Amino acid sequence: MVCTYKLYLLNRHLFIDLPEGRALIDTGAPFSSSTSGRLTWQNQNHGVNKGGYMGFTFDKLSAEIGAQVDALLGMDLLAQTTLLFDVAHRTLTAGDEMPAGFKAQAYELAPMSDIPLFHVTLSGHPARVLWDTGAQYGYVTDKKFVKGAKALTGFKDFSPMFGDLHIPQSYVLPFTLAGHDLLETVGEAPCVLGGGISPVPMGPFLRALDIDAIIGPSWMPRVKVWLNPLDQTFAIAI
């Protein structure tokens, strides 16, 4: 079944509107949630976690993001179908064939999940990056990725997994994904606990999983992204 949704980038997050309200598209989340415990996706109503995500209520998520959030659409539902993200034209198409002109290639999964891992060149270095559309900013786990880059003003972020994140400096780093040159704003992944549910800080946590970086959705308006979780392939085109 092919379904097309209005997709929009708001406050560095991706959203679609579902019957249950505004839903955050979160490729970094292993499961979905909503205020009601139900979520309509591809014209089917699903039972999902009720009330929040990893200890965060939707009121707190809304306050942190700066926009009303009524649901979170995670990889448990996203991975059931093909996805075409076209942020520039504000559409998310689910359940269709790969468009002409796209060249599919394989991607990996984060351990014990359906969360996508891409192989990229980041600041001239090969890197395994986790694609997390629920992340406002990217994060790197090794100083080599920011060496020589211009340090910019830092940022404050949050994560249900890792808590409050106070990043003193940020960097705009080039990365190449599937032959396309893109940019992401990143900070260094913290090595101290921030109050989330993880007993391990973000930096050591990612390094233990052999993940070099996280990238969010801020680069997506420049390209169209095709994801097929059913055969674990993706493609990018202008």
Image: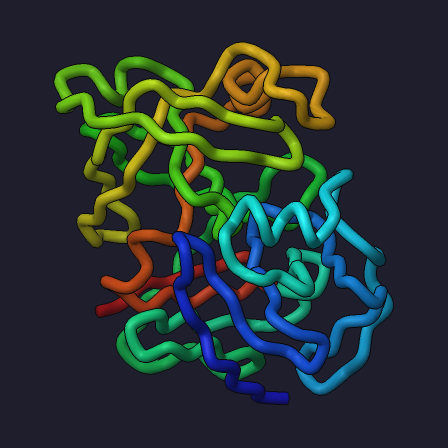
Q: 166 and 86: which one is in front?
A: 166
Going by the image, does 86 lie left or right of 6? left
In the rendered image, the residue lying farthest to the top is: 192
Is residue 235 visible to us here? yes
- Residue at 82% across, 70% down: 38
**Image height check: is 107 above or below 221?**
above
Q: Quadrant of residue 193?
A: top right
Q: 154 and 150: which one is in front?
A: 154
- Residue at 28% across, 42% down: 184
**Image height check: is 209 above or below 144?**
below
Q: Position of residue 137 (x, y in %)?
A: 39, 39
**Image height check: is 230 above or below 62?**
below
- Residue at 15% across, 23% down: 149
Is residue 79 visible to us here? no
- Residue at 56% across, 27% down: 164
**Image height check: is 138 above or below 47?**
above
Which quadrant does the C terminus fall into? bottom left
Going by the image, does 229 lie left or right of 47? left
Callout count:
0
Q: Position of residue 129 (x, y in %)?
A: 43, 36
Q: Position of residue 189 (x, y in %)?
A: 44, 21
Which quadrant does the N terminus fall into? bottom right
Q: How is the image coloured?
A: rainbow
Going by the image, does 237 lie left or right of 205? left
